[in-house]
Amino acid sequence: MTNTALLERRNRLFGKGSTLFYEQPIQLVRGEGVFIYDESGRRYVDLFNNVPCVGHCHPHFVKTVSSQLRTLNVHSRYLHQSILDYADRLISTHHDSIESVIFSCTGTEANEIALQMARLATGGRGIICTDATYHGNSAEVSKLTGAKSNQGDVRSIRFPETYRTDAEDPLNDHLKELQLVIESFREDGTPFAGMLVCPILANEGLPNIPKGYMAEAAKIVHQAGGVFMADEVQAGLCRTGMWWGYQMMGVVPDIVTMGKPLGGGIPLAATAASTEITETFRRHTRYFNTCASSPVQAAAGNAVLDIIEKDNLQENVTTIGHFLHERFLQIQQKHKTIGDVRGHGLFRGLEFVTDLKSKTPDKQAAVRVVNALKERGFLTGNAGAYDNVLKVRPPLVFSKNDAEEFLDALEQTLEDLDA
Ligand SMILES: Cc1ncc(COP(=O)(O)O)c(C=O)c1O
């Protein structure tokens, strides 16, 4: 079927407005490692997908999940060893006070559970998030998207960053704002429950965060009686070169949420915390999630961990991530539209601006680069608070060769666009 016919059918069946990438959407039919192929057999290098984090259709992943599908596929209300083995393995990658886990299927659900846990553990209601975040799309979690700073149960603070700030001391400037918002809850009698934040501020555009911010913010939250929640849905599972983004940021959260890459494409998400927090949640809710904690989720989760460990992917992320960053800095020198280069491990961002002095975000430039790269066979995206950040987030198996191929294409693209 042609792309035009598929698009027409999709609009009719899904309703117009369902999100699609690229000015000319692509039809994907097959994946292998860092490559994905369209219906004509054209090869694209995938620099965007963090769900098949160990590479598309990794043989060990396919074999393990298929074997489980052939053996048993039931929901969570039976005893089964492999989901407990997986829970143990997952918990062991976290700090000591993360002792138990509740499985679900999406990042949204994991965050929904975290918000309920925070409220039950503290007896509070008030939640703090950043002003350019996304944590999911349920009725409760979506209150964190576009939350106001001074009203409601969910209130926002400006996301902490060093690129656009005029403050002499950005760290204290942002911490003061957090204290003020906590104070605003106190003033109108809304008991405070906690703060939910992606430790590397992925959706905000991976800004450089003032050093020490997350640890200091957690201290302030604790002093006010709240819990500190790290959303690892994008930041986690070795994306930064460390198991979890909070480890990269030097903070110890009370509750951690995980999703996207966890199941390598099989829906698998998790909310982890101390036994005390988890059991308080269990006592007050009768939480049940039909497709979660299943043997198939366990097979997928275990296979992903097997590959990360066996193929040394954590080291690969650090090495290739560093290589990309150094080359991005060189490329930035040649292009006055690249205002900032940042990120961690294999999660990098190039911020496009109209000029280096005003730092005015240039979304159109980022969109042009994304579409031109796609025409050359490299799939990236644009994101961030102003949608002007070129988002580079390849599978964790991305090699130096892949990186070199991509960097050449990026340089050519920027030259051609005179960006
Ligand atoms: C940081 C973060 N948290 C949570 C979510 C929601 O995850 P899901 O789409 O699996 O519900 C997303 C999705 O993009 C996300 O970026």
Image (tube, helix red, strand yellow):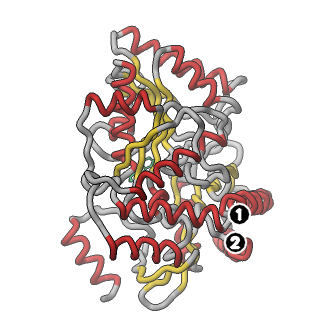
What secondary structure is marked by label 1? helix
Q: CA gap, disc 1 to disc 2?
A: 8 Å
For this orientation, the residue located farthest to the left is 12
Foreground mark, 1 or 2?
1
Image coordinates for residue 277, horizontal then vertical, percent: 41, 29
Q: Closest to the observer: 363 or 74? A: 74
In the displayed structure image, the side of residue 405 where residue 150 appears, left or right: left
Q: Can you say whether 360 is above or below 165 in the image?
A: below
Residue 131 appears in the rendering: no
Question: What's under tag 2, amino acid-wise?
Answer: Ser
Image coordinates for residue 252, horizontal then vertical, percent: 59, 32
Image coordinates for residue 56, horizontal then vertical, percent: 51, 74
Q: Residue at x 48, y 39 (%)?
A: 256
Q: Closest to the observer: 419 or 75? A: 75
Residue 371 appears in the rendering: yes
| Label 1 CB-ligand 1 distance < 8 A | no
Q: Mark number for residue 399?
A: 2
Q: Mark number for residue 68?
A: none
**C-beta proximity under 8 Å, tags 1 and 2:** yes
Q: Residue at x 39, y 15 (%)?
A: 185
Image coordinates for residue 306, horizontal then vertical, percent: 57, 64
What secondary structure is marked by label 2? loop
Q: Give the residue number, with chain letter if any, for mark 1.
A: 316
Q: Can you say whether 79 is above or below 96 in the image?
A: below
Q: In which quadrant is the C terminus drawn?
A: bottom right
In the displayed structure image, the side of residue 320 where residue 93 appears, left or right: left
Q: Can you say whether 403 is above or below 149 in the image?
A: below
Q: In which quadrant is the N terminus drawn?
A: bottom left
